[in-house]
Image (cartoon, rainbow, N blue to C red):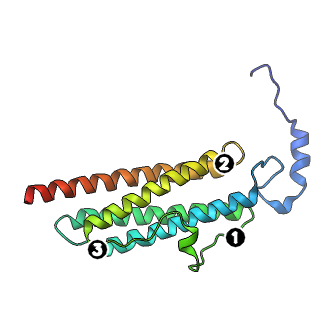
Amino acid sequence: MADQPFLTDIKTIRERARQHIERGAVTEGYRADRENVINLLNEALATEIVCYLRYKRHYYMADGLSAHIAAEEFLEHAQQEQQHADWLAARIVQLGGAPNFSPEGIQTRAHAEYVEGDSLKEMIKEDLIAERIAIDSYREIVNYLGENDPTSRRIMEDILAQEEEHADDMAGLLEGLDRLNQSNA
């Protein structure tokens, strides 16, 4: 690798930068199918919005002996899901697209479902299921992006890492709730 010169001379890079400046951050070196990436990011955006809404509802609806612990997690996760949505929206704009925040059709665009759950245990279980859906679909998006769009890939990897933490948190809450219920039985 050390013997190989830099692949593109700076003069060529400077010339290319002056061409198609209306594309902003999308240069000739961008190799992904931009429209498809924007669609995938909009699906992830819808997923994050659905997850934010579900966590927010669970925060307010948490009831029972362990409710305060679960509610704190729900609120923290809601805030992180909102941050993910902001990162995705900003990236969509960088790619020359428009983030789709329309409530119409959000459920069909989202990978995760909005399931409310009637009890604290059901809420935690539904949140865990949604996180597992996000983990698998986001991992596929990361693999699809590969080296063709390293910036979008990095954003999705960062979101994926937090979704894995969320799933771990929900699994821990579920386990703790089960232990509590067994000791009270």
Residue at the top extreme of this rendering: 3
SS label for mark 2 = helix
Q: Position of residue 185 (x, y in %)?
A: 7, 60
Q: Which residue is mark 3?
A: 118
Q: Which residue is mark 2?
A: 145
Where is the N terminus found, in terms of image quarters? top right
Which residue occupies 45% across, 61% down?
Answer: 80
CA gap, disc 3 and disc 1: 36 Å
Q: Position of residue 22 (x, y in %)?
A: 84, 63
Q: Quadrant for residue 9, please give it.
A: top right
Question: Mark 2–mark 1 contact, CB under 8 Å?
Answer: no
Q: Quadrant for residue 62, please give it.
A: bottom left
Q: Position of residue 147 (x, y in %)?
A: 69, 42
Q: Quadrant for residue 44, please give it.
A: bottom right
Which residue occupies 80% across, 23% down?
Answer: 4
Q: Position of residue 97 (x, y in %)?
A: 72, 66
The answer to whether residue 145 is left or right of residue 84 is right
SS label for mark 1 = loop
Q: Is residue 127 above or below residue 62?
A: above
